[in-house]
Image (cartoon, helix red, strand yellow):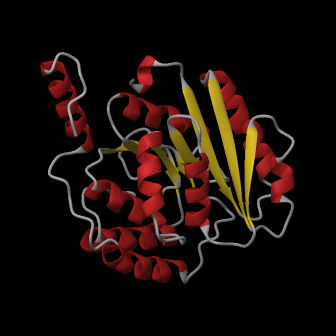
């Protein structure tokens, strides 16, 4: 059953680390958006070993489920736990600062409804979308983007925007394979998706750089080192000859030719 043919629903994962001050406002905004746009929704807050009251700020809301990491394990691990806990389809993960406004989820959902397996926010696409970032961050992003293209990924301009939507079955196949817990986990996920033949669509979004970004001067170096690990970590993963969508179509044709029965594996 396609996403567009059923009642509209969504799971939203918010990875958090020391977000007690900002989280209540974020949850109010996300809940209001979901009530307006979806018939059924869930919000999953993953507290990644915060030292403040982040977990308490998320509790006592009927729409919110919480997951707590006992210690800080990194954003990638927090996202992985939340995505695998999702019950509804599709599943979106978003930065808790809402640098990408939550309403941009509708553009990603439209891409999935049109046939994509994964829709990712793209802050570089030309058009009417507003993107605000400092010059330093622009230079770092440009350098990292070129490095990623050389080492791991082709055809994707923006790997690092923390706003990505997956079909639930796709997420539940890819995320158990994830090994990186740091900032470069996005590259690993997209690398896996390409190798497995899933269709990835980039969607232009509005984006504003957070004043409280946790990226440091050493973050790009660590990210680069992690990107170098990706091919080694998944050396045995061969590229499919068909995309996942093509395989589904082939199964449907085989079932139709056989009188509607499911073909033997």
Tell me the quadrant of the picture where the N terminus can be found. Answer: top left
Does 109 sit left or right of 126 as displayed? right
Residue 35, placed above or below residue 121: above
What residue is shown at x 25% (from left), y 34% (from top)? 248
Residue 260 % position (x, y): 22, 17
What residue is shown at x 75% (from left), y 50% (from top)? 66
What residue is shown at x 45% (from left), y 64% (from top)? 178
Residue that sits furthest to the front in the current view: 264
What residue is shown at x 49% (from left), y 56% (from top)? 161
**Observer-nearest of 264 and 40:** 264
**Observer-nearest of 215 and 176:** 176
Residue 20 % position (x, y): 82, 57
**Observer-nearest of 189 and 87:** 87
Q: Quadrant of residue 9?
A: top right
Residue 140, placed above or below residue 211: below
Q: How many marks?
A: 0
**Observer-nearest of 20 and 13:** 13
Does 232 sit left or right of 251 as displayed? right
């Amino acid at each position: 059953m396609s996403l567009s043919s059923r009642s509209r629903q969504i799971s939203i994962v918010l990875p958090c680390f020391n977000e007690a001050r900002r989280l209540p406002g974020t949850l109010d905004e996300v809940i209001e958006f979901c009530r307006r746009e979806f018939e059924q929704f869930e919000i999953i807050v993953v507290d990644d070993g915060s030292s403040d009251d982040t977990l308490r700020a998320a509790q006592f809301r009927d729409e919110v489920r919480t997951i707590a990491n006992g210690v800080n394990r990194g954003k990638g691990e927090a996202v992985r736990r939340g995505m695998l806990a999702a019950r509804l389809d599709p599943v979106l993960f978003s930065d808790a600062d809402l640098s990408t406004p939550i309403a941009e989820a509708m553009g990603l959902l439209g891409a999935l409804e049109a046939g994509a397996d994964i829709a990712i926010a793209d802050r570089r696409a030309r058009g009417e979308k507003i993107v605000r970032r400092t010059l330093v961050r622009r230079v770092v992003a440009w350098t990292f983007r070129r490095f990623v293209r050389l080492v791991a990924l082709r055809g994707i301009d923006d790997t690092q925007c923390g706003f990505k939507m997956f079909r639930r079955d796709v997420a539940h196949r890819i995320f158990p394979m994830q090994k990186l817990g740091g900032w470069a986990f996005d590259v690993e996920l997209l690398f896996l998706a390409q190798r497995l033949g899933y269709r990835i669509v980039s969607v232009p979004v509005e984006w504003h750089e957070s004043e409280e970004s946790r990226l440091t001067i050493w973050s790009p170096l660590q990210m680069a080192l992690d990107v170098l690990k990706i091919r080694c970590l998944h050396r045995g993963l061969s590229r499919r000859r068909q995309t996942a969508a093509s395989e589904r179509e082939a199964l449907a044709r085989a079932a139709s030719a056989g009188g509607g029965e499911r073909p033997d594996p």
